[in-house]
Amino acid sequence: MIIKHQSGRGNKIHLLLDDEYVVTTNVNFWLDHFIADGTEIDEEQWEQLLDDINYNKALNKCGDFLSRRDYSVKELKAKLLRTVDEKSADTAINRYVEAGYLNDDRYCERLIEYLFTVKKYSKYHVKQECFKRGLPEQLISEKIQDYLNESEYSAEDAIIELINGKYASKLEKEDGKNKVISALMRKGFSYSDISSAFYRIENDEI
């Protein structure tokens, strides 16, 4: 098989075997793995080159995704598998785990704190949101319990903040209180906590 390359848009490099397009990589990779046009390579050499291309792509994808926000291992792998093979995805993810840039424990702790303190989610919704992000169920339960044990979190306080903030305008409408109660229950708060929160507001116990 005869290998050739063509420059594409931006930093893209298109590789051809016997004048037929096969795969695209980038300039940096090609500079490190350059093969002169017209060179004959065998199947084993090509497969190795292709593995290296896919691994490089997976590494770059990992870096791009993690530069935007944190991910769980499972969630990141699912995104990688849309464009790279499983072997390359696993190898790249392991590299980021070993380097400390991908850590389910740390991500779970940060996410739980954010959902409780900023989003004012109920315990149920925190658990569901973490699970949606691909975090293991046992890890989620352990980290939620750790957070509740170590923080001053109160479901009633969270509900009061929501009532006085996000839902304040709804209370002024017809049947507003019942609608707010329903909305809070849909967010996973218990009726007893909601009732206690309203009692404290109505009796100036906040």
Image: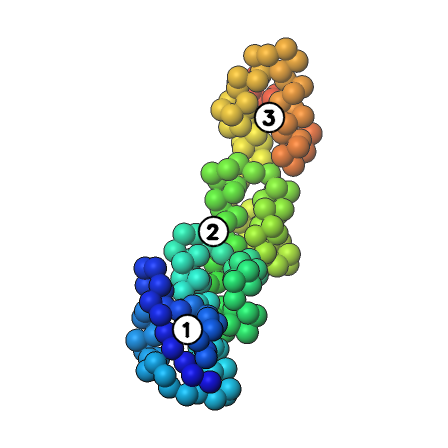
Residue at 61%, 59% in the rendered image: 136
How many numbered discs? 3
Question: Secondary structure beneath disc 1?
Answer: strand
**Residue where numbered disc 2 is placed:** 110
Question: Secondary structure beneath disc 3?
Answer: helix
Look at discs 3 and 2 and give the one toward the viewer: 2
Label 3, label 2: how many angstroms apart (C-alpha)?
27 Å
Q: Badge 1: few (under 14), some or many (20 or more) residues near its Cα, within 10 Å?
A: some
In this rendering, is residue 130 above or below 6? above
Measuring from the top left, give residue 99's x and y in whole percent.
41, 70
| Residue 91 in view (yes/no) | yes
Residue at 46%, 71% in the rendered image: 21
Question: Secondary structure beneath disc 2?
Answer: helix
Residue type, mark 3 in image: Ala
**Residue where numbered disc 1 is placed:** 15
Which callout, 3 or 2, points at the residue further toward the start of the chain?
Answer: 2
Which callout, 2 or 1, points at the residue further toward the start of the chain?
Answer: 1
Foreground of the two, 77 or 36:
36
